[in-house]
Amino acid sequence: MSGTTHQCLCGATLRFRQDLTRERTGATPTWTCADCGTRVPGVVAEKLSHQHPS
């Protein structure tokens, strides 16, 4: 099984929780790219947040 990845608008490939920044702005957290601050879709971010580099 391969891991989930997301290509950010800034060109960064997001693979792991470390590639994201979590912001609590309301009832649900908002996830953004750690490099540029672009919002990452919630479903994708939740999958990425559970992946850890091995």
Image (cartoon, rainbow, N blue to C red):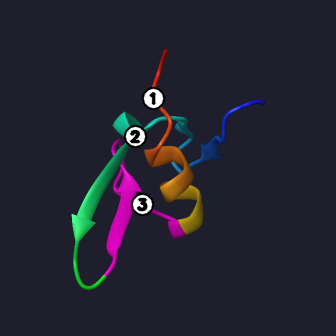
Q: Where is residue 38, by image quadrant?
A: bottom left
Which residue lies under the disc numbered 2? 17
The boundaries of the magenta stretch are: 28-42
Spatial CA span between label 2 and label 3: 15 Å
Mark 1: which amino acid?
Answer: His
Image coords of residue 51 (percent x, y): 50, 36
Give the residue pinned by disc 3: 38
Label 2 or label 3, whichever lies nearer to me, is: 2
| SS at mark 2 in the image | helix
Q: Residue at the spot x=52%, y=45% of the render?
A: 48
Please tell me how crowded label 3 is: few (under 14), some (14-19), or many (20+) other residues with Cα within 10 Å: some
Disc 1 marks which residue? 52
Q: Secondary structure at mark 1?
A: loop
Identity of the amino acid at label 3? Thr
Q: Quadrant of the N terminus?
A: top right
Q: CA distance from mark 3 to mark 1?
A: 21 Å
Query: Looking at the picture, how far across and down is residue 45, in whole percent?
Result: 50, 56
Position above or below: 3 against 53? below
16 or 54: nearer the eye? Answer: 54
Q: Does label 2 or label 3 sit earlier along the sequence?
A: 2
